[in-house]
Amino acid sequence: MKPASFPVVALAGGVGGAKLAEGLAQVIQPEDLTIIVNTGDDFEHLGLTICPDLDTVCYTLAGLANPATGWGRASETWQALETIGELGGPTWFRLGDRDLGLHLERTRRKRQGQPLSQITAHLCRAWNIGAAVLPMSDDSVPTWVYTTEGELPFQEYFVRRQCRPQVTGFRFGNVEQAHPAPGVVEALQRAKLVVICPSNPWVSIDPILAVPGIRETLPSACAVAVSPIIGGKAVKGPAAKMYAELGIQPSALAVAHHYGDLLAGFIVDKVDAEQAGEIQTSGRHVLVTDTLMTTAQDRARLAKEVIAFGSSFSR
Ligand code: GDP
């Protein structure tokens, strides 16, 4: 039984974001949960519109995700990609057969003129996802990664080059002209709690916050973040490497500084308990707990703790 709840908004990237989003979905009434998802890593590939973070969140909430990778679908097959390879086409971005079905249908709908938010709402209905999953924007806001080897489109850096190039900065293309997707601002205005999931601050959360209107509307007095850095390391992906390459020692404290005044509360892993004092000195509430989500029970437990923590000081 889910307890009586109140409006909660989560900001999420892919794998780390999806895990906590799924925990929140286990403990909050669906009508009270809105998940705003990064679309900065969306791209066109093989003529198709691919939205990796949105798809990771939707597959996870629908119970369709591959538990081993955290992205893509369970019980996937790879025959289409094999054929593409046989014919000399690009296979560096792994797209399974089931996954391709989604990209084909999304691209078909886009070509008919449907905005991404409408397409996403449709697939959530089809997959019985109760929470509202919203792209941060219906406008294209592609993330570019500045590296010592030049400026790279995000997936070129992330997948093709496997995050090897040394990062010097980021750019969110066209973001000044972008608008929040329908429902984003309204959800933030209604929220009694905003949860910044343990996603990559640089390339999953910053693009969302860069869309004009989102940071401005976000109610800091009831916003909390979960650190994606545990013991100086990312659980997965390049977040710690990015901090180090940008000259910042990766830590929960660095993430807390990253978000600055945006937050009233911050959640650190118990292995980083000694950093709690310094995070608190900036006037922020701090919760120290186990933040590693390995099982579905871990996700629900962390989600409950995040809600109880946020409720203890929010509006
Ligand atoms: P991506 O777009 O697929 O890279 O996904 P995200 O940005 O949402 O997630 C990547 C971040 O999630 C990394 O910085 C990881 O350290 C973090 N992460 C993944 N799993 C966990 C977890 O179980 N607990 C915490 N605290 N962070 C996690």
Image: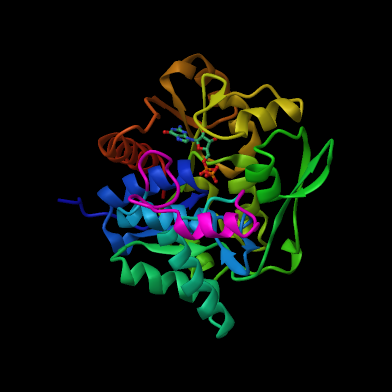
Magenta extent: 66-92
Residue at x-position 75% and y-position 35% = 165
User: Above or below — where is 234 with respect to 224?
Assistant: above
Is residue 67 within the magenta segment?
yes
Which is more toward the observer, 195 or 291? 291
Residue 34 is situated, as x and y percent measured from the top left of the image, at 41, 60
Residue that extends furthest to the left in the rendered view of this protein: 1
Q: Is residue 255 above or below residue 59?
A: above
Q: Position of residue 257 (x, y in %)?
A: 64, 32
- Residue at 53% of width from left, 66% of height from top? 185
Give me the residue at 32% from left, 57% from top.
62
Closest to the observer: 272 or 164? 164
| Residue most extreme to the bottom | 112
Q: What residue sits 30% from the left and 53% below the top?
A: 63
* Residue 139 in picture, x, y percent from top left: 65, 70
The percent coordinates of residue 69 (x first, y second) are: 43, 40
Q: Is residue 9 visible?
A: no
Tell which of 194 and 238 is nearer to you. 238
Looking at the picture, does residue 241 appear above or below residue 11? Answer: above
Q: Is residue 145 visible?
A: yes
User: What secondary structure do most residues of the magenta stretch adopt?
Assistant: loop
Q: Is residue 174 left or right of residue 114?
A: right
Whether residue 198 is in magenta: the answer is: no
> In which quadrant of the rendered view does residue 140 lie?
bottom right
Residue 143 located left or right of residue 224: right
